[in-house]
Each structure stands twice: as structure tokens, then as C-alpha cells.
Image (cartoon, helix red, strand yellow):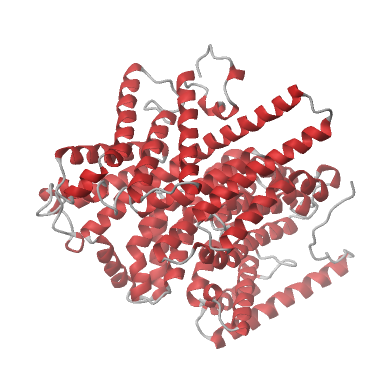
Amino acid sequence: MSQDTPHDEIPESMRSADAIQPRPVLWAITLTGIALSLFQLYTAGIEPLGLFYQRPAHLGFILFLAFLLFPLTGQNRRRTWWAWVVDGVFLAASFASGFYIIWFLDDIIARAGWWSQADIIVGIVCTVAVLEASRRAVGLGLTIIGLIAILYALAGARGALPGLGEWMPGLMSHRGASVDRLVGQLYLGQEGIFGLPLGVAATYVFMFVLFGAFLEKTGAGKFFIDLAFAATGRKPGGPAKAAVIASAGMGSISGSAIANVVTTGAFTIPLMKKLGYRPAQAGGVEAAASTGGQITPPLMGAGAFLISEYTRIPYIEIVLVSIFPAILYLGTVYLFVHIVAMKQGMRGLPASELPVVRQVLAAGWQFIVPLVLLIFLLVNNISPMRVGFWAIISVIAMAGLRGAWTLYAAGPMTVPRIKDSVMRGVRMVFESLELGARNAVAVSIACAVAGIIVGVVGLTGLGLKFSSMMVSLSGGNIVIALILVLIASLILGLGLPVTASYIVLIVLVGPALHNEFGIPLLIAHLVVFWYSQDSNVTPPVALAGFAGAAIAGAKPMETSVQAWKFAKGLYLIPAFMVFNPELIYGGPLPHVLWTGFTAMLGLVAFAAAIEGYLFGPMKAAVRLVMVPAVIALFWPSFTAELVGAAVLVVALTVNWLNARQTRQEQGQPTPAPETVQTHPD
């Protein structure tokens, strides 16, 4: 914003991070964001468009918005004249990239592979614009990987860069592609930039991101946080437990671990520190809990939509089978939090500092209605894109009803008061439309670059080569194969956001996991998706951990180590899916119940063994015995599972008896099981 711009004349959504942007740019950002969101709402609920209309238009809007939001000089410096020239070129390129295909679609289809010079030039312009937008909005790592993929496609005896092909190892070599063939694959085909990843981002993901933006603007974030504190605040380590619950609620609709950390962490991390958690612990708890939002239905950080598109399994089935694993993960983080609180003798917050459940529900019941409607429509097999549309309409309707009731209850219905209330509602709608578009920029650009990588993989046959290499390195051992997938996901996570990491990894290793190792298709996708989340909490790159460290005032690496410890379910639960597919696919009731019991028992025992505490302190010898017993629960043998479960039950029972005896000797009361408590008004 320029210095002579009155602050109050700028909409609230354009403040803070946009402080150095000139006023015309701020309004251009607002208008572009609103136009994009209205376009998406129109195509989702009124008039659906075909593939080569919807995706190019979406990309054109997204690129245009990205170059407005992220100047060449960086977000903390004003644009110079030469930066305006460069950004002006990229803004024009953004418009051309999206709308060239729409305008000349019939001619392009008629040419059917015999591309004109204009087709190739615009394709190159679009590819460059996508990579530059990725560098600005997502990070340099993803851009470099996209460039490497392009160079790899051009390398080879028949490619545009034959000399580069001479440096390729035998397994990775291929005949190479010309520039025309590569551009045809990436820009003018259905497997490149406008492929499945961008298609999912341009339809399902955007609508749910926009839905989350409307909930955020109408106060859903505060509702979830207050409800979590009301339910758990009086328990030992209450703020940390509230962080787990609130992050699950927020993450299930926002789909971003980092956004989750900065939203809920701003409330929970200071309270955790006040209660006695070390700063690194507080930041680590919030990072691990926020990562749980990425795997919690319905949004799952865009994962549920992508898995559905890749596997052709209905979206609602993906959501339903993901509920119990998400509960297991969040329950494990909750248990770690509880153990740390008990070890350090923490107490909950006093009732006077906590919200009341009844008051929270009375103030925020309207946020429950859209979620119930969303679930109802999904269960009835309505398209997720249309479900998102009606969910957004329901949020607007409920906010309007709530505003009308508040206006009626506050006093006489005068014209000025009605006008003021209507204007606030209209402003909220426009701010939500802009916020949703802003929030979608990074994921859509990441999906576009992922489309480049996927297109190169299909053009060069890299996927089959990578799968063969994986089978060879693992020697056919499924455990080693899973470890290799985990390592690959961590390496990709150094430069890619989790959605792009999942897309690239499933294209490379998915065929081997399913075809060579016999892992069911859905479980193979879930394993890769869960492992792709590790860049949020695993050093050396733990993005959610770093965000938590910034709020907690702790060292980033120390906070990341704590987040990695609390998020251990991220590694164990996918492995349990592989060796116990009943967890996902179901089966005879006794078998399903036994599988669920062993999963919970194994996670509880693992957390206790790591912390050396459950009901009370745990001896080192007992902890050592528990480790192989936990491993036995993963073994695909009922006898091994039975022996492991028996050992763990005995060990935990002994720990409970010893703790009880110690408390009796010290004259301490036995702690009661945790229940949700409220206090009177």
C-alpha cells in the first residue's frame, strides 16, 4: 500500500502482508481473486465446463494472481521500474497461457499433433511462467526439480540435448525428446501441465479451500479452538490437548499444516509454555497436531481427491476408510501430550480462564450445519465439486441468518442498522472470495509443476525404470521397500510441498508397490500419501516444525525433533495398513475388532516405550521387552500378534499396578479416567 493511502479504505483482507503494495495492485489482487472464485463457483454449481476450458482458465487466473501477489523483488520490497517491466511480461504471459488454448481450442484439436509455431511458442511461455510462479509462490526446490525433469526429457540420442544424454546412467537413459514433442506433451496434451493434478486442484480442491476460507472469515477457527479448550482445558496439559483437537478440526477444512500451526498455534503455544511445556515441546506438539489435519477427512490436504482420481475409487469411500487411521494418529499425539504432562506434574487451566461448552455451542452452532450438510451430500454420492458449492452456499446462508437474528435481538430494526449489517455481510463474502483464491495459489501452482514432472515421467518411461530400480534395491523385501519409499518421500520433501511430493512419488513407486509387492492399490496410495507428510515434521526440513518454532521462540531444529517424536504415528500407521489391510478394507467383525485393538495397543505401547512412562515411570528392561512385542503386532501372523499383544498387556498392567502402589505409598489419589468436563455459567 502506498504511504498516502488511507488504511481504513482498504478491505481487511488486503492488509498486513500487502502493506508495501501500491493501492492499484491491491485492488487488482482483490478483483482477480474475486473473479477467480466466482468463476469456480459458477462452473461448480451452475454450468460445468470441459477439461480444456476449466483447467486453462483456472491456470490463467492463478498465474495472474501469483505474479500480482509475489513481486520479482520479493514481498518485503517495493517493485522497481525494471521489476514492473519483468512482472508485466509475466502477467501478459499468464493471460496468454490460460486463454490461448480456450480461444484456439478447435484449431488445436484439428491440428491433432501437427503443432503450429505459435502453439510451441505459447507452450514454452506457459512452461516458463509456471516455473517462475513456482519459484516465487512455492519455493526454489520445486522449480529446480521441474527444470531437471525438462532437461532429462530433452537428453538423449534423438533429443534436443544429445550431449547431456551421454552422462545418463544406463538404467536412466532414453532416446530423448525434441522441443516440439516435449511442449506438445506438457502444454497441448492431457498428461502435462493441464493433467490430472491441476484438474483436481481446479475443481475439487479449490472449492474446499474456498469453503475453508468462508468458515475462517465467519469465525469457525475461534469456534473450534474454544470448543477444544472447553473440552480439555482443565485436564493435565490441557492447552496441548486442545491443540491436538483444534488442529484436527481446523486442518480438516483448511488442508494446510503450516496455516494450521500459525492459526491455532498463536493461541495454544503460549498457553502450553505458560503451563510448563518447554518452548520446543510446545512448538513440536502444535506441528505434529497440525500435520494430523492433513490426513483428517474430509479435505486431507487435497489428498482424498487425488487418491480418488488416481484409483477411481469414490471420494466418499476414501474419506470413510481414512477416519479410523486419522483417529489413531491424533490419538497417538494426544497420548504423547498426556504422558509429557503427567511426567512433569502439570495441571490444567483454572475454570475461570476457560470457555464454557454451552456458550461456545450457542455462539457457533451455525458452523456445524454446513459440515453436516457436506457429509450428507457426500454420503449421497453427489460430486465433491458440487458438494463444495452447496457447502459454501450454506455457510453464507447460516451467516446471514445469524446476522439477522443478532440484528433483531440487539434492538429496533432501523434502516441505518439494516444497511450496516448488510454491508458487513457483503464485505465478508467478498473477503472470503479473495481469501479462498489467495489460499489456492500455492497448491494450484504446485500441481501445475507436478504435472510437468508427471508428463516427463510418462514421456520417458521413468516410472517403470524407477520401479525396477526399487525392486532391485529392496531384493523383493517389502519392509526394505517401505523404508526406501520413506527415504524417497523425505528427499522429495526437501523441495516439494506435500501434495506435489505425493503426486511425484506415487507415479514413481506406486506401480512397484501394487504390482511387484502385492500391496492393495488403495493402501499403496494411502501409504505414499501419509509418508509424503513427513516434510512437515522431519528434520532437516520440517516446515510445520519451523513455523511452530517461530511462534514458540525456540530453536527450529530442536522443535523439529520434538515434532518428529510426537508424529511417530505418521510412520507406524501406514506400515500397519500394509500388514493388516483389514484396517482399511474391513472383513469379518472379529478380525476387524482384533486388528483395531492391536493397532491401538501397539501405538500406546510404542509411545510409552519412547517416553518411559504411561501410568507411572517405566523401567528400562520393560521398555526393551516392549519394542519387539510392538514389532510382533505388525507381523502378518496371528500367533506372532497374539504373543506380542499378550506381552504388551502384561507390561502395561505391571506398570499400572506399580504406579498405583507408588501413589498409595505416597498418599496420592488415583487419577480418574479423562472425561469432558464443563463448569457452570
**Where does the image place residue 525, in percent across and percent down from the top left?**
43, 65
Can you see residue 265?
no
**Where does the image place residue 324, in percent across and percent down from the top left?**
60, 67
Q: Residue at x 63, y 84 (%)?
A: 590
**Where does the image place residue 225, in percent across and percent down from the top left?**
70, 46
Can you see residue 81?
yes
In front of the other: 529 or 304: 304
Instruction: Tell me where residue 96 sits by quadrant.
Output: top left
Q: Is residue 109 left or right of residue 480?
A: left
Q: Residue at x 26, y 46 (%)?
A: 187
What residue occupies the far top of the structure in this picture?
4
Residue 154 to residue 648: above or below: above
Q: Residue at x 24, y 41 (%)?
A: 123
Q: Is residue 394 left or right of residue 497?
A: right
Looking at the rendered structure, the number of numbered marks drawn on it comes to 0
In front of the other: 624 or 247: 247
Instruction: Tell me where residue 13 sits by quadrant.
Output: top right
Residue 85 to residue 402: above or below: above
What residue occupies the far bottom of the structure in this picture?
639
Residue 137 to residue 542: above or below: above
**Where does the image place residue 252, in percent across and percent down from the top left?**
59, 53
